[in-house]
Amino acid sequence: MAVNLVSLIMQFLTPDMIGRIASALGLDRNNTQSAIGAAIPGLLAGLSGAAAQPGGAQKLVDAARQQTGALGSFANMIGAAGQSSLIEKGSQILSSLLGSRDQTALAGAVGKYAGLGQNASGSLLGMLAPIVMGTIGQQQGTRSLDAGAITSLLSSQKDNIVAALPAGFANLLGGSGLLDSLGGAARTATAAAGQTARVTTSAARAIGDTGQRAAAVSLNWLYWLIPLLAIVALLIYFFARPAEQVVQPSVPTIPSLTVGGLDIGKQVTDSITNLRTTLTGITDVSSAQTALPKLREVTAQIDRVDGLLGQLSPEQRKVLAGVVNPLMPSLNQLFDKVLAIPGVAELLKPTIDALRAKLTLLTA
């Protein structure tokens, strides 16, 4: 089975691990989660470019060998005396591999995307660098870790990296050159992200303008609870009836759950319903090819919601997680069933892995 570095790294960064990282850096957990979701494909894109530079692949080999034990020791260093050393070493690795200009550009893009300061995002990247290099080293193994092998591995990840780039984040990196190694796929992702990024930025600005009324909004969280519970009931109603896979009654009108111009409740409902319909229609490679644009569209829709998570109150996040959590088991079963179809995994796995990760953000 083909390796997906983005998926492997995100599996290591469990919700508990992300919470510990946020606490250690003094950051909001939701913002940290969004930052990590952007930073991992951003780092891998930068490393792919570094591998193509003269002497760059050998630098990557040396860094990966130095971090072969990083995954095993990482958890013990968070919040401990060795944390500063971990961040400093990771920052030195990135400076050596990417150069200070690209390192600063990536930290700035991550910060803007997730609402973090430049210093905070720089520290986060320094903390993530050993994880990324440790995962690369683990996949290659110390005996087979050489310049050619690491270049080949990173080159094989281009589609996975592009699929994992959050909408809007690719646009922030568009002028840095960090995505150049990904070729035309990255340019397509950057162009497609433009409109989504503008919507997300406008939404964040609109919500920011209401910051002075945050206390009043938090007192009214029951306004969100009632309609979202209605969504839960509707989605469970549709997902619990396996016999009715083709014709389904129309969804009744749902009360508006608008955040900065985006009706989150309706978006999540529509996206997951469309996702289930698309997945159940995949029976072979041909139907998988037809479904791929639809899956990418759903991924972009969920990513737009993910981009607004940091603007929600804790109560609203809890209710939203209550909508998605009950649906994940059936969705994961559909994902696994589709990927088990001969020839389909090679085509759809990068997109499905990215989609799983983005849906998981809604459950935290």
Image: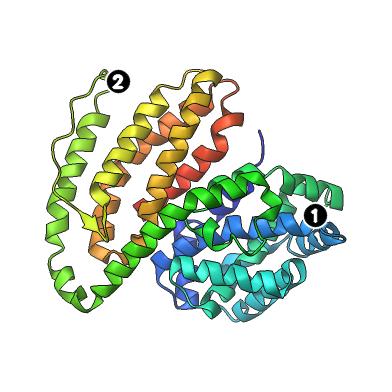
- Residue at numbered disc 1: 52
Is residue 101 visible from the viewing direction of this image?
yes
Q: Crowding at label 2, few (<14), some or many (≥20) Cα neighbours within 10 Å?
A: few
Residue 190: x %, y % from top left: 54, 52
Earlier in the chain: of badge 2 and badge 1, it is 1
* Image coordinates for residue 4, horizontal then vertical, percent: 63, 43
Q: Provide residue 303's location: percent of width, then percent of height.
A: 42, 51
Amino acid, disc 1: Ala
Q: Does the residue at mark 2 contact the one at mark 1 (Cβ under 8 Å)?
A: no
Q: Secondary structure at mark 1?
A: loop
Quarter where residue 271 is shown: top left
- The numbered disc on residue 245 is 2
3D distance between C-alphas at marks 2 and 1: 48 Å
How packed mark 1 is, by other alpha carbons closer than 10 Å (few <14, some 14-19, many 20 or more), is some
**166 vs 96: above or below:** above
Image position of 304 (left or right of 131): left
Residue pictured at 53% horizontal, 28% vertical: 339
**Left/right of residue 308 with respect to residue 58 in the rendered view:** left
Q: Is residue 11 left or right of residue 71?
A: left
Q: Is residue 359 above or below residue 85?
A: above
359 versus 290 height, above or below: below
The amino acid at mark 2 is: Gln
Question: In terms of image quadrants, where is residue 348?
Answer: top right
Q: Tell which of 253 and 41 is nearer to you.
A: 253
**Quadrant housing the N terminus:** top right
Nearest to viewer (mark 2 / mark 1): 1
Q: At which x and y percent is residue 44?
A: 65, 56
